[in-house]
Every structure is written in C-alpha cells, then in structure tokens.
Amino acid sequence: MPKLRKTQGGKQEKKVIHPYSRKAAQLAREVHKQEKKEKLKTDKALRLSIIGEKLQWFQSHLDPDKIEYTKKEAGELIENYMCRFNAELEQIELQNSIKGRQGRQHGSRETVIKQTIERERQLYEGYGIEIPDIMNRKHLKFFRFMRDFMYVRGILDLQIKHPDEETVPTCLPDWELNETNLKAGGLK
C-alpha cells in the first residue's frame, strides 16, 4: 500500500471537527465570549464619548470670570445645553422648505435630534440631569483646566433638576460625608 504524501512545510492537515462534538461547543463558546467582550468595549467607548462631548460643551461655555455658579446660573447653562441643536434644526427645516424637493432631506438626523432633546428634557424635569459640579469653587477650577476626559469619574457630578427642585449630588466622596452635612440637610 502506498504511503500518504506529507504536507508541505511540515504543516499537518487541519482535521474537520464534528458540529456536535465537545470541541465544536468549546470553540463556539470562545467565539461568543470574544463577541461579547467586543460589544461591551464598544458600548463603553460610546457611553464615554457621549459623556466626554457633554463635558466638553460645558467646559467651552463656562464664563471665565466666574469663580462659582449659583443654582439659577447652572439651570440657565443647562437650558443653553438643551438648545444646542436649534441652529441645526433650523438648517434642516430651511432645506425642507425649499420648493421643488420631494420628501424630507436629513429626516433621520432630525428625528435623532428631536428624540435627544425630548429625552434630555424629561431627564431635566424629572430625575435631574448630570452636569459637572460648577457650584463648588475647587471642582470648577479643576474642571476648567481638565483637558483629558478619560478621567470622567474624577469629576464630581451634580444632579440638577428643574428650577423648582433642589440640587442633589450623585456621588459624594467619603471625606464630605460627615455629620454636619447630614444634619444640616445640605452640602457646604
């Protein structure tokens, strides 16, 4: 009986794996695990980029002469933040109003902008919207000179509600949680 020819370069031929074997199940688990890791990685990157854009907007719209902001001024800044898409919406409406055009141009972008504005408005009037702590001098100074938004968690966020509601910090460092702040019912 003749011998089988050896493969070139010392490589062995790849064996076919039965689809119902343990090895196939192991490979499927590994692939699923890698896909899950990649999905989590992209979701986290997207979330951080959205937060980074928000922080960058607030940083660029801060008044350089102010040492700290009041609650009313922070509310006005949030209102300006929610109106950031007005110019783009006007441009889209202008393009759609031109006669002789069929359908709506940029309809999907317009829908995304309106949904974003509505979601932020509900957040602001309901639970509250998170902004950097601009009411505290130390945190405002740190935020002004911050260039890398990779350290987003280093910034103390405030939860600002509609002007009728009060300001509630979303997280407090342990050194600020003491009896005087808790007894006074607020932050100093």
Image: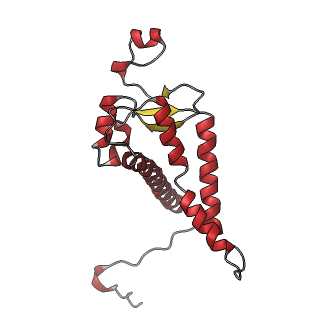
Q: Residue at x 33, y 43 (%)?
A: 151
Q: Residue at x 58, y 45 (%)?
A: 120
Q: Residue at x 54, y 43 (%)?
A: 79
Quadrant occupied by the N terminus: bottom left
The single residue placed furthest to the bottom in the displayed view is 2
Residue 144 is left or right of residue 94, and the answer is left
- Please state the horizontal and vertical placement of residue 154, each as a whole percent of the image: 34, 37
Count of all numbered marks drawn on residues in the image: 0
- Nearest the viewer among 115 and 10 is 115
- Please state the horizontal and vertical placement of residue 4, each as a whole percent of the image: 39, 87
Q: Is residue 106 visible?
A: no
- Nearest the viewer among 18 and 116 is 116
Residue 134 is left or right of residue 94, and the answer is left
Judge whether 136 appears above or below 100 on screen: above
Q: Is residue 145 visible?
A: yes
- Nearest the viewer among 156 and 71 is 71
User: How is the protein colored in the picture?
Assistant: secondary structure
- Please state the horizontal and vertical placement of residue 38, each as a whole percent of the image: 46, 57
Quadrant occupied by the C terminus: top left
- Please state the horizontal and vertical placement of residue 43, each as a whole percent of the image: 49, 53
